[in-house]
Amino acid sequence: MSYFKKCIFIFIFIIQLSSLARAETLKLSALKQAIDLGKNFLTTKLLEEKYSLSCKASIKKSVCPVSNSGKILLSHFIVNVLSPDISTITRDKIITMIHAEENNGLWGYSPSSPLDSDDSSFALQTLTLLNQPQESNKLAAFYKPKIHAYATFLTNQDTPIAAEVNANIDNVFHILQQDSLINYELLNHLQTQQGYWRSHFYSGKYYSTYITMKLLCATQRKSSSVTRGLHFIIVSQNQNGSWGAPGNAYETALALNTLLACEIKSSESVKKGIKYLMKQQQKAGDWSAGNIIWTYLYQEQPRISWSAYDNQHVLTTALSVKALIAYYLQHAKESHEQPKL
């Protein structure tokens, strides 16, 4: 090869590298823009106190009494996205709200709802993230020694074990550095043969799986349960990169957060899922989905159930932004760029 041809070859090679670098920068800038829009949407909802879940009864003659509630649950997922850079005003609003709904160290879904271990766990985790020291001893009131598991409500009746609730309680133990209290045996036992964790209250296969898998991976319990859980997530992805039937932003965000929590950040499944989420973001910075978030059986005869929906798009947006942040940070690291969040 002549000297001239070598120079041309090197020049073309440099141009190609520059093009790739610009494309990568644009990809990172698009992720950053989507994250910022999502964060701004969530912050506005918090400051305006417009974050809650709607609720509908299964029959028209009945009314769900906890519609426009669920701030304890939602604030947990929002703070996970906004911290540690949450503003003082926003932080104080959340802390004030949580303390206002507290009842002797425990919480319910709403101020008028029965105390439950799930919302109490959300509150304890959120306050801890906001640098408010907490203790887990109050959760002992829900413990059932006969079944070595926690009940959802304060009752003497035998109730089904809710996998997602027990995993949420174990997440409290982890964040408070009390890993010795985590019941790994129960978590492994509650996993289905297909690899997911079935929820008692929350809809679909991905919520309980995410809550459990993020704990197992955070505590570095690289067991067969984790392997089966990851396999389930990967093989259940739709061709367009989404998860759910039909595919939707809510379940896609849950599945992505499961993979990302377990350090599966560069796989084709993650890339396809992120691309799907990016396409689903609305102009206001939010993500919407019509999924039922949770269902509660109010009475057997006549059968009446209540179902909650993310009508203000807060939960779906928080989960989507969380997934984008994890992907962005890894992408920036691989590109040797300083993350700008």
Image (cartoon, rainbow, N blue to C red):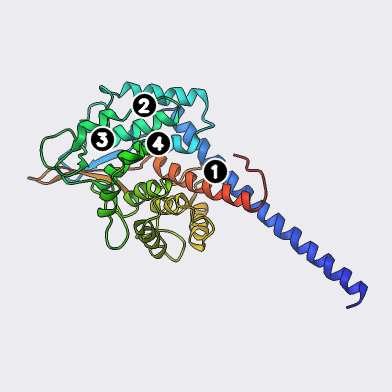
- Mark 1 is surrounded, within 10 Å at the Cα level, by few (under 14), some (14 to 19) or many (20 or more) other residues, namely many
- Label 1 sits on residue: 35
- Mark 2 is surrounded, within 10 Å at the Cα level, by few (under 14), some (14 to 19) or many (20 or more) other residues, namely some
Closer to us: mark 3 or mark 1? 3
- Mark 4 is surrounded, within 10 Å at the Cα level, by few (under 14), some (14 to 19) or many (20 or more) other residues, namely some
Q: Position of residue 59 (x, y in %)?
A: 16, 45
Closer to us: mark 3 or mark 2? 2
- Label 2 sits on residue: 134
Q: Are marks 3 and 4 in contact (CB under 8 Å)?
A: no
Amino acid type, residue under disc 2 in the picture = Gln
Element type where label 3 sits in the image: helix
- Label 3 sits on residue: 117
* Distance CA(mark 3)–CA(mark 2): 15 Å
In the depicted structure, whether residue 177 falls above or below residue 247: above
Q: Position of residue 203 (x, y in %)?
A: 28, 50
* Distance CA(mark 3)–CA(mark 1): 31 Å
- Sequence-wise first label, 2 or 4: 2
Q: Work out which residue is located at the far left of the displayed protein and give it.
A: 301
- Sequence-wise first label, 3 or 4: 3
Which residue is more in the foreground, 336 or 37? 336
Closer to us: mark 3 or mark 4? 4
In the depicted structure, whether residue 86 falls above or below residue 201: above
- Sequence-wise first label, 3 or 1: 1
Q: Position of residue 79 (x, y in %)?
A: 45, 34
Which residue is more in the foreground, 173 or 214? 173
Q: What residue is shown at x 52% (from left), y 47% (from top)?
A: 326
- Label 4 sits on residue: 175
Amino acid type, residue under disc 4 in the picture = Ile
Q: What residue is shown at x 11% (from left), y 46% (from top)?
A: 303
* Distance CA(mark 4)–CA(mark 1): 25 Å
